């Protein structure tokens, strides 16, 4: 057995050594894959933990995890008891060891606990895992994190999986008590991050209702948003809580919660922290989109404050931040356009006027853009932004109608340090306009006059000797748009 363990150890080292030729490495991996399925792999894996190599130790831990998933039902009760004791002993031994080895052992224990809970072998798995505090909070959080994830990955009969899922949901308050304890006691950064990841796992995979989290949990997570390394995970946890059906049924609850982020956003904007601005922008816009129908039907002050907050995010100078709000304006504009025109739309008109200007500004080329060097494939990020802007332009047009073209005309006339910044941006706006004129409502007389001003300007613009062919094609596309009632091109 020990000789076989040495052979496996050598092949693992060979497989993870870059200096070994590809053929030898491939052969080593084939042998190791066959080894994992062999009956002797259980005992040999135990011997491999004596190796000084972290790669070998990780291979041994992963082998145990793989065999638990494939062969759990073939083990007798005595073997299962021995395996559980082994995993706990190994976790204790590697509690201060290599992270990847410890993490894979925690995954193996979670895989065993899940299957043991489903078949009745280990009904007290939650209490027993939580009682492992002597091994360290990190190990307990690791195992708790993996339990819901492993439920989705495990191959179990449908009835068993459903029963196990409901059992874990009932045990959720115990898990969140551990999570909250680790977030409250001013832990080290890695431990706080793992606690948040654990919460996210339970919320994402099991859709735990907020009422099961404890009255202080949401506020506790909010308090960690100001810590940049924790921000992304904390924001995801908050999103899962606020979008749960239990909360979404009362729109003012999530809206009031995200409005609390306004100061955090403004502080991040002043400090130039784009990551926090982007995360907040994404969350606020998502909450707005999910409650857009309620917003159009209700003039409550907090709904309008949310719209104003989203508009602030749209005006962020970084396109990546602003673009997260585009879908909200699409959704809101579509719902508003379905309503008869009236005073209920007026509070939104000014917002869409600002959105139109922002969209045109975001789609400008950079100040150092040189059209003579444009090979057609440059600035892919700008092209992606333009694509995501198209539907938002449509929403602006639906609500503003003739005013939309007035904004385009004003942008044409506005001075710029680089004329191409304005010209190319407006050409894109006009390209979207051409599509709108073809597919949406017919032009009114007011729109016809606004377009007349634009086209007269473009006729002069076409006479520029340095105009790139792509810009000429864009203008001609606008001129060639299907004519609508009320739009007369005879003035050419």
Image (cartoon, rainbow, N blue to C red):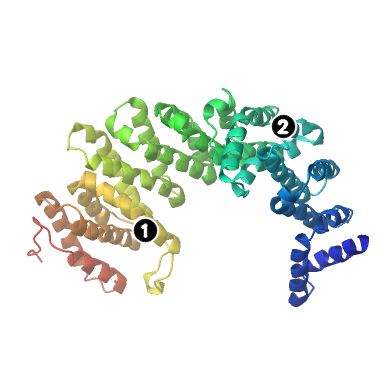
Question: What residue sits 13% from the left and 62% below the top?
Answer: 483
The answer to which quarter of the image holds residue 93 is: top right
Please name which of the two marks, 1 or 2, marks the residue nearer to the observer.
2
- In the figure, residue 115 lies in which quadrant? top right
Of labels 1 and 2, earlier in sequence is 2
**Percent position of residue 6, x then y:** 89, 63
Q: Secondary structure at mark 1?
A: helix
- Label 1 and label 2: CA atoms lie apart by 53 Å
* SS class, disc 2: loop
- Identity of the residue furthest to the top in this view: 215
Q: How many C-alpha atoms fall within 10 Å of the one at disc 2: few (<14), some, or many (≥20)?
A: few
Expressed as whole percent of the image width and height from the top left, the position of residue 135 reads 81, 36
Q: Please count the marks in the image.
A: 2
Which residue: 12% across, 53% down? 449
* Residue at image location 44% in from the left, 27% down from the top: 253
The residue nearer to you, when weighing 102 against 325, is 102
Q: Quadrant of the C terminus?
A: bottom left
Is residue 468 among the parts visible in the rendering?
no
Res 78 visible: yes
Mark 2 lies on residue: 124
From the image, tell me which residue sits under label 1: 387
Image quarter hosting the N terminus = bottom right
Q: Residue at x 23, y 44 (%)?
A: 399
Q: Is residue 17 left or right of residue 289?
A: right
């Amino acid at each position: 057995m020990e000789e076989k363990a040495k052979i496996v150890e050598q092949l693992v080292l060979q497989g993870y050594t870059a200096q070994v030729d590809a053929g030898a490495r491939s052969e080593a991996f084939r042998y190791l894959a066959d080894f994992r399925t062999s009956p002797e792999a259980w005992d040999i894996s135990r011997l491999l933990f004596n190796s000084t190599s972290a790669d070998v130790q990780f291979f041994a831990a992963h082998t145990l995890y793989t065999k638990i998933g494939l062969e759990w039902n073939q083990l007798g009760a005595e073997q299962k008891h021995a395996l559980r004791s082994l995993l706990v002993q190994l976790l204790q031994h590697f509690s201060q060891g290599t992270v990847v080895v410890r993490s894979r052992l925690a995954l193996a224990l979670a895989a065993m606990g899940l299957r043991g809970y489903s078949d009745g072998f280990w009904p007290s798995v939650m209490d027993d895992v939580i009682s492992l505090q002597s091994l360290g909070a990190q190990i307990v959080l690791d195992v708790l994190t993996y339990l819901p994830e492993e439920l989705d990955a495990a191959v179990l009969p449908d009835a068993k999986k459903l029963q196990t899922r409901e059992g874990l949901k009932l045990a959720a308050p115990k898990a969140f008590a551990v999570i909250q304890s680790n977030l409250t006691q001013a832990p080290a950064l890695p431990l706080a991050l793992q606690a948040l990841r654990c919460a996210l796992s339970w919320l994402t995979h099991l859709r735990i209702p907020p009422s099961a989290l404890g009255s202080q949990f949401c506020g506790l997570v909010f308090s960690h948003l100001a810590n940049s390394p924790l921000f992304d995970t904390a924001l995801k946890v908050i999103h899962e809580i606020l979008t749960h059906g239990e909360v979404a049924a009362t729109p003012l609850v999530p809206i009031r919660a995200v409005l609390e982020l306004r100061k955090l956003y403004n502080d991040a904007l002043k400090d130039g922290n784009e990551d926090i601005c982007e995360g907040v922008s994404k969350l606020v816009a998502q909450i707005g989109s999910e409650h857009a129908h309620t917003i159009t039907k209700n003039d409550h002050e907090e709904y309008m404050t949310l719209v104003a907050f989203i508009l602030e995010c749209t005006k962020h100078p970084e396109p990546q931040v602003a673009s997260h709000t585009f879908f909200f304006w699409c959704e809101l504009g579509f719902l508003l356009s379905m309503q008869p025109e009236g005073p209920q739309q007026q509070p939104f008109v000014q917002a869409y006027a600002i959105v139109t200007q922002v969209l045109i500004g975001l789609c400008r080329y950079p100040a150092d853009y040189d059209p003579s060097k444009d090979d057609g494939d440059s600035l892919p990020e700008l092209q992606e932004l333009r694509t995501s802007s198209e539907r938002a332009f449509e929403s602006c047009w639906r609500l503003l109608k003739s005013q939309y073209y007035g904004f385009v005309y004003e942008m044409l006339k506005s001075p710029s340090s680089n004329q191409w910044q304005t010209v190319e941006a407006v050409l894109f706006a006009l390209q979207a306009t051409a599509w709108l004129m073809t597919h949406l409502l017919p032009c009114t007389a007011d729109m016809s006059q606004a377009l007349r001003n634009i086209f007269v300007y473009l006729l002069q613009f076409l006479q520029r000797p340095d105009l790139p062919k792509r810009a000429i094609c864009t203008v001609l596309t606008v001129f060639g748009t299907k004519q609508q009632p009320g739009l007369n091109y005879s003035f050419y």
